[in-house]
């Protein structure tokens, strides 16, 4: 009998950063599902770079012990446990050609990476830019962690 494949969750930087920095919440719950192997984290190289930059910036405002915990314990441990599927950076030409897909230019590399990965969900809090129209244009299922958990609860109940 074949085991079902875990849901593949493409995480935007706000979900990943939020989950790492928060002590609890839906972002943290998403990361817990990925760390436990229940879901598969899909991580764009572009998002990984943004998250690392954000974490280093935030960690610089923390006391040294807390900064080390965020980087070494929270982020590095999560990456080891989750073993994310990495999506390479899209080419500059591809970014330019796909500009029409989403209103905010900075989100184009994220969106292209998600299209290449074809995940079960693209999870983001950026509903201003990752709209239902973007979902229709790309065929991606886009939602917040709250929407994901609501739909998940309906499937398992």
Image (cartoon, rainbow, N blue to C red):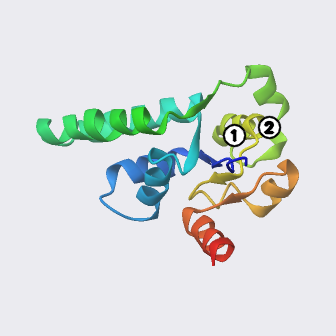
Say whether residue 100 is left or right of residue 127: right
Q: Quadrant of residue 57?
A: top left
Image location (x, y in percent) of residue 79: 43, 34
Q: Nearer the viewer, residue 114 or 62?
A: 114
Where 56 falls versus 4 (above or below)?
Answer: above
Q: Residue at x 56, y 59 (%)?
A: 125
How many other residues sit within 10 Å of disc 1, few (<14), some (14-19) or many (≥20)?
A: some
Mark 1–mark 2 contact, CB under 8 Å?
A: yes
Percent across and percent down for residue 101 are 82, 45
| Cα separation between marks 1 and 2 | 7 Å
Q: Residue furthest front?
A: 1
| Residue denoted by label 2 | 99
* 89, 33: nearer the viewer: 33
Name the spot of residue 25 as percent of width and height, x first: 40, 65
Q: Quadrant of the C terminus?
A: bottom right
For marks 1 and 2 on the same chain, the one whose residue lies earlier in the sequence: 2
- Disc assigned to residue 105: 1
| Residue 43 in picture, x, y percent from top left | 58, 36
Q: Which type of secondary structure does the marked residue at label 1 adopt?
A: helix
Please state which of residues 95 and 9 is positioned toward the viewer in this rendering.
Answer: 9
Q: What crowding class fits label 2: few (fewer than 14 Cα within 10 Å), some (14-19), or many (20 or more)?
A: some
- 106 vs 141, left or right, is left
């Amino acid at each position: 009998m074949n085991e079902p494949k875990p849901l593949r969750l493409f995480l935007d930087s706000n979900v990943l950063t939020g989950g790492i920095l928060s002590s609890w919440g839906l972002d943290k719950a998403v990361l817990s599902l990925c760390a436990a192997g229940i879901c598969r984290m899909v991580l764009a190289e572009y998002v990984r770079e943004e998250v690392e930059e954000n974490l280093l910036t935030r960690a610089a405002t923390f006391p040294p012990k807390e900064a080390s915990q965020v980087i070494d314990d929270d982020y590095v441990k999560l990456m080891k446990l989750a073993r994310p599927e990495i999506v390479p950076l899209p080419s500059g030409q591809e970014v330019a050609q796909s500009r029409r897909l989403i209103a905010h230019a900075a989100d184009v590399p994220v969106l292209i990476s998600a299209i290449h990965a074809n995940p079960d969900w693209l999870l983001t809090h950026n509903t201003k830019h990752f709209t239902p129209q973007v979902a229709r244009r790309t065929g991606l299922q886009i939602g917040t962690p709250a929407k994901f958990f609501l739909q998940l609860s309906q499937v398992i109940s």
